[in-house]
Amino acid sequence: MERLKEEWTEFLDVSKRIEESFEAFFREKAPRDRPDEPEIEEREIEEIGNIVEVKEKKEDELLENPNVVGVGIGYRVREYKVTPELCIQVFVTKKLRKDMLTERELVPQDLDGIRTDVIETGVIEALTYKSMYRPAFPGCSIGHYRITAGTFGCIVQDKKDHDFLILSNNHVLANSNNANIGDPILQPGPYDGGTQRNIIAKLKKFVPLLSGYNLVDAAVAKPLDMRYVKASIAKIGMPTGVREPLHGLRVQKTGRTTQYNRGRIISTDATVKVGYGPGVTYLFKNQILTTRMAAGGDSGSLLLGMCKRAVGLLFAGSSVVTVHNNIFNVLMALEVELEPRQRYY
């Protein structure tokens, strides 16, 4: 955690300037009656389709570059100003002068006629209300008994047996694959003082993190007693459904570390390399990138639009961007739903 803080300090100014630039661009692009949801022009829909094809064809080659941590689709940034030009975004740990790079390390200015944009993010790593709460609520500290702490994302319902479950990340509830079904889940998480006296749930199922590629970092746990939890997210309220991500969409989340904050979606259909500790990196596809909204311990937070419809599940980030799984992939992989047939409050 201390190493992360030191590395992030140098990027804070970059993060702030990028955040302000995207905010100004999307605020101007949005209709006055819907300032949180910029309109997409017909030409952009067609452009995105073409860009997706090129990105999927070229991203493996780009990701072979050790300085590249992700590839996505979004608006091009020039001198900290967002332009209306859609492009393939190439996220790097550090921007270097051309004379410091080998020919293999240089990112092409365009790929099959599609412009590229190199964005410095730093290293992207999995990110691990801190008190005990009963009932516990989405947004507070939670975690597998062998981890530090993460965030209680929301309540979902199992499609098969209709159990109500706590949703968070694999690395929060299942210790990055190193857990057994039935393991105790603590609230607050161990880092925040959680002990065996604070068991709130048992691990029910998780999506394994794979060496090939992943769509989600997700898991669910079954509360010992539904009286110990509630479904309303701190500072946000009850989720009202789910929705697809949209460039420029204003989003919100509540997490264990940075609590409530807002941001904007800046990249979709992103493929990113995410560090899970020394020597461990997993590849994730179809991810959502936002302006910086999190710090260590916010993993597991539910990402929602301002209309309270869920968009993603936060799991990783750097000092410049935050990375989220697409909520549709999360729900499908775990075979759960966010809008239970039998409404629970």
Image: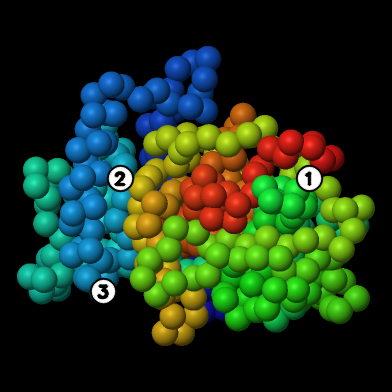
Q: Is residue 1 above or below residue 51?
A: below
Q: Residue at x 52, y 45 (%)?
A: 328
Q: Nearer the viewer, residue 226 or 109?
A: 226
Apparent side of residue 266 relative to residue 116 in the rendered image (left or right): right
Q: Secondary structure at mark 2?
A: strand
Apparent side of residue 11 relative to residue 335 in the rendered image (left or right): left
Apparent side of residue 15 relative to residue 109 in the rendered image (left or right): right
Q: Which mark is residue 66?
A: 3
Say which label, 3 or 1, has the lower sequence index.
3
Say which label, 2 or 1, has the lower sequence index.
2
Q: Residue at x 26, y 36 (%)?
A: 48
Tell me where residue 84 appears, x and y as whole percent: 26, 31
Tell me where residue 260 appears, x and y as whole percent: 67, 47
Q: CA distance from mark 2 to mark 1?
A: 33 Å
Identify residue type, mark 2. Answer: Ile
Q: Dot 1: few (<14), some (14–19), or many (≥20) neighbours within 10 Å? A: many
Q: Which mark is residue 231?
A: 1
Q: Mark 2 — residue?
A: 73
Q: CA distance from mark 3 to mark 1?
A: 42 Å
Q: Quadrant of residue 236?
A: top right
Identify residue type, mark 3. Answer: Pro
